[in-house]
Image: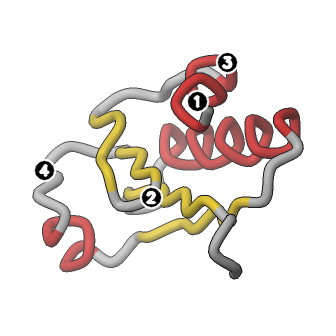
């Protein structure tokens, strides 16, 4: 990962909503053609370390952008730009 890469993290235990959020995030990154690392985090200690108590959650560059919902690909693209 270099300095221009965005870091996109999906926080969740692995439920269907978490999988959908990860899919939407990967699609948004691909459609924007940006350099980004998409990471799925299922460790509950890491998730609660973010202060997140409701999953799934979307974190971009260390900042929580969505909790307890699955933003669409279009919504994620707006958050990434």
- Which residue matches tag 1? 76
Q: Are marks 2 and 3 in contact (CB under 8 Å)?
A: no
Say whether residue 32 is left or right of residue 3: right
Badge 1 or badge 4: first in the primary sequence: 4
Q: What residue sits 55% from the left and 57% below the top? A: 8
The mark closer to the camera, 4 or 3, is: 3
Distance, label 3 to label 1, CA atoms, is 5 Å
In the rendered image of this protein, does residue 75 appear above or below residue 36? above
The mark closer to the camera, 2 or 1, is: 2
Residue 10 is tagged as: none
Residue 53 is tagged as: 4
Say whether residue 74 is left or right of residue 31: left
Badge 2 or badge 1: first in the primary sequence: 2
Q: Identify the image quadrant of residue 62.
A: bottom left
Crowd tier of the residue under label 2, counting other residues whose Cα lies within 10 Å: few below 14, some 14–19, many 20 or above: some
- Which residue matches tag 3? 74
User: Residue 37's spot in the image, x, y percent?
Assistant: 67, 67
User: Residue 17's spot in the image, x, y percent?
Assistant: 49, 38
Q: Which structural element holds mark 3? A: helix
Distance, label 4 to label 3, CA atoms, is 25 Å
- Which residue matches tag 2? 61
Say whether residue 11 is left or right of residue 50: right
Q: Which structural element holds mark 1? A: helix
The mark closer to the camera, 1 or 4, is: 1
Badge 2 or badge 3: first in the primary sequence: 2
Q: What residue sits 79% from the left and 39% below the top? A: 27
């Amino acid at each position: 990962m270099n300095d221009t890469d965005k870091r996109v993290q999906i926080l969740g235990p692995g439920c269907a909503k978490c999988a959908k959020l990860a899919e939407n995030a990967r699609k948004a990154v691909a459609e924007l053609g940006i350099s980004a690392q998409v990471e799925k985090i299922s460790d509950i200690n890491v998730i609660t370390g973010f202060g997140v108590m409701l999953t799934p959650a979307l974190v971009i560059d260390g900042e929580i952008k969505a909790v307890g919902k699955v933003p669409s690909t279009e919504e994620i693209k707006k958050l990434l730009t």
